[in-house]
Image (tube, coloured by chain):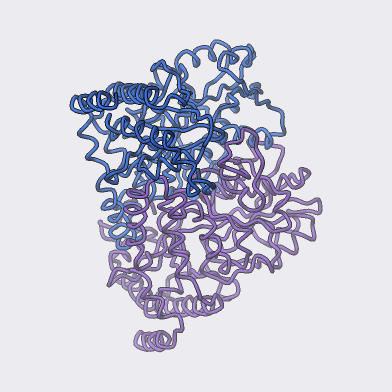
Chain colours: A purple, B blue
């Protein structure tokens, strides 16, 4: 059975139109890295690019590099490179701050567009930071707004009601890999007078996205997962063009001012998306992100999606054959899943993942019982999927995870 | 006259107890860099440190580096190194986000401690982003608070009134270099029932600070100026220990949660200062900042202050002798100035600074008429002060600034 799966993977790797991109990344030999949904791999040559920023731009060019090395343009450069990946005009994208901070901005902006909106609808299983940020904003505003959390997307229409509100959803769920129907849910929300904010943390660079065609109002997303921007890379946000003139966000630092270097004591928001910036951007981290986005030039996102489906599909097939005790959490229907596969384990939990990592297959674990495997179509191979399933079976069959060394919990899981 | 000044500088450099620190920085030969108040110089060896983070930690260690390379600890490491420089317990310092974002957090927290506080008092000449952030928060909260801007610190008591409020000040003014009496103004505000937020952007690393002894309530500051953390380095904030339990900030992302990796849908703020964090930190930029702070280990801040006063004093003396057309904007009293000297010019403005930079002396310009020169006691020499005054006199005497090449305005000034 394993031989047949290996042969199938080998054939798929041979036919893979995206296979040349693997060489554009640095990956440790002997490691099967299936955690690009947590931290993307390092692009080849990234250390030279960063080294140039440190030695030539910072150490030699010093403050003049804001102009001469184009630091001031970095957020726009990153936005232009990101635009085709998310189906948005670059003039609607700000690359800045963290996803959490950006969510605060777009949520405030969305509420500000119509102060009668008092309801924020999300899923209880949304990524927690999204709920925390909504709660933080609601508390700040004196608890005059309501955060309604549904257990199932089916409940969204009832939760939205007809009086308008904000629908705040993650496109691909961080814990299950389930993908929502962005276009359908956006339309549904609009019909009910609501605005929609999409969190693309687990979508951007992993699935096809067309924010403009879906008529999304706002979006946020993460630079360090499938986009490979480096640890803690700056995040991004999107504001639909028809909201840009009226949208205001409260973190109105100098980089959001019409003329930051006029040092005007009075605030005038920049025209366009720059009003969503706040303070001075972290140039080293932003340089890495902009460089990582350059790898995506000419990548066909439809090909990304096809390969992602094939990778996750093959992995599901292999796991179900080799590891009968595991339960698939991610939807079997490829139209309903992102680029990750999640499996629940009857026992062992984190220790299983720690044992698997010790065998050279890197995924991660989400409490209480979920093993997560992210597939990055730019650099993951079909052989990786088979190898991961094989090693996972070994960890389970040989009860490797029961060893003392895999008990305990590291600071970050 | 120039000869006497040079001899004086030479003697001072010989006697300078901090002179060994200059070798800890990379500075272009032939450049007199007096812009460390805008972007600090690069510490020696910083590229090797960043390169290690990129190649060993990110590219090889991948997601495991959050634990194995201690990325998760970086904000605490940076806070511990920063603590003695600002006279604060490390457990009261968060190194995170930008100064603007942090100001939003502490301002929200300060207002939240007593909702009856409806008045924010600041200076019209405060750094604009501080005013913009206060305005953004006030707008978000429905304009129920008032931002009162005084023209002169003398007006602060009247502006505060007796009903409590928030006093939000920059310790050292970005445009004039004037330093306020932190202890006296904090006490004055407390006597009137107000809380005080200090912006230390132009103070930290430049002057002696003792937030604890001054009984400051909150503070924010910048990592990329005198602290040499690199372009757009993360910023910091301070919350007094007696406010920590009750203080809440609205940008309550997952890194502020008591257990970020429990992925609990319900929010519980972390105990202590970690509640002031928000999202995932930009590891490359934060690594550079933490490394730059290591240079300060064992630096005597009293020696920093002594040298700063001597440097700025010598520069003022030299400029007044060599450039009689310029007007000193910075207070002559060393107790009232930070580590920069600002001079107003009767004509020429930005072109004078551009010409000066072309002659190898880097300062910057603030509209409408101010030349700024920042003195970083860790790496600036007394000879730099004389050389800068000499070149400035040349630009003015020979009208070099009138040349076509120095007209026009770059994107960043």
Question: In the image, what residue occupies the spot 35% across and 26% down?
Answer: B315
* Residue that protrudes farthest toward the left in the picture: B14
Q: Where's residue B330, x and y in %?
A: 46, 23
Q: Where's residue B337, x and y in %?
A: 42, 21
Nearest the viewer among B104 and A91 is: A91
Give the position of the C terminus of chain A as an image quadrant. bottom left
Q: Where's residue B302, x and y in %?
A: 29, 21
Question: In the image, what residue occupies the spot 31% across and 30% down?
Answer: B386
* Residue that protrudes farthest toward the front in the picture: B398
Give the position of the N terminus of chain A as an image quadrant. bottom left
Quadrant of the image occupied by residue A145: top right
Nearest the viewer among A77 and A47 is: A77
Query: Is residue B404 shown left or right of residue A49?
Result: right
Q: Is residue B98 above or below residue B300?
A: below
Q: Is residue A366 above or below residue B289?
A: below
Nearest the viewer among A394 and A258 is: A258
Query: Is residue B356 shown left or right of residue B190?
Result: left
Question: In the image, what residue occupies the spot 65% across and 34% down?
Answer: A266
Query: Is residue A383 shown left or right of residue A93?
Result: left
């Amino acid at each position: 059975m394993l031989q047949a799966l290996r042969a199938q993977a080998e054939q798929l790797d041979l036919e893979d139109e995206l296979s040349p991109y693997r060489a554009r990344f640095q990956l440790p030999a002997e490691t099967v890295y299936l955690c690009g949904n947590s931290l993307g791999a390092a692009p080849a040559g990234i250390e030279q690019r960063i080294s140039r920023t440190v030695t030539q731009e910072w150490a030699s060019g010093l403050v003049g590099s804001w102009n001469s090395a184009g630091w001031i343009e970095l957020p726009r450069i990153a936005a232009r490179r990101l635009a085709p990946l998310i189906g948005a005009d670059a003039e609607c994208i700000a690359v800045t701050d963290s996803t959490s901070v950006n969510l605060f901005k777009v949520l405030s902006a969305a509420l500000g567009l119509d102060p009668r909106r008092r309801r924020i609808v999300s899923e209880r299983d949304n990524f927690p930071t999204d709920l925390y940020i909504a709660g933080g904003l609601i508390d700040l505003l004196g608890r005059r707004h309501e955060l309604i959390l549904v257990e199932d997307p089916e409940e969204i229409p009832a939760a939205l009601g007809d009086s308008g509100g904000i629908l705040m959803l993650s496109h691909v769920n961080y814990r299950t890999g389930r993908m929502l129907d962005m276009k359908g849910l956006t339309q549904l929300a609009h019909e009910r007078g609501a605005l929609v904010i999409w969190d693309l943390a687990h979508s951007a660079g992993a699935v096809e996205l067309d924010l403009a065609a879906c008529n999304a109002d706002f979006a946020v997303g993460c630079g360090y997962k499938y986009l490979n921007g480096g640890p803690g890379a700056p995040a991004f946000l999107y504001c639909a063009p028809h909201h840009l003139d009226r949208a205001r966000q409260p973190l109105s630092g100098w980089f959001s001012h019409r003329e930051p270097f006029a040092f005007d004591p009075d605030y005038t928001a920049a025209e366009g998306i720059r009003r969503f910036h706040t303070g001075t951007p972290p140039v080293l981290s932003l340089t890495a992100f902009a460089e990582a986005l350059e790898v995506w030039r000419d990548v066909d996102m439809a090909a990304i999606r096809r390969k992602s489906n094939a990778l996750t599909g093959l992995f599901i097939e292999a796991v179900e054959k080799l590891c009968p005790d595991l339960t698939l959490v991610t939807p079997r229907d490829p139209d309903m899943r992102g680029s990750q596969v999640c499996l629940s384990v009857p026992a062992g939990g984190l220790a299983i993942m720690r044992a698997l990592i010790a065998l050279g297959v890197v995924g991660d674990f989400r409490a209480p019982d979920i093993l997560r495997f992210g597939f990055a179509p730019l650099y993951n191979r079909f052989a990786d999927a088979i190898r991961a399933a094989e090693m996972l079976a070994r960890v389970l069959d040989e009860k490797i995870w029961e060893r003392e060394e895999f008990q305990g919990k590291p600071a970050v899981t």
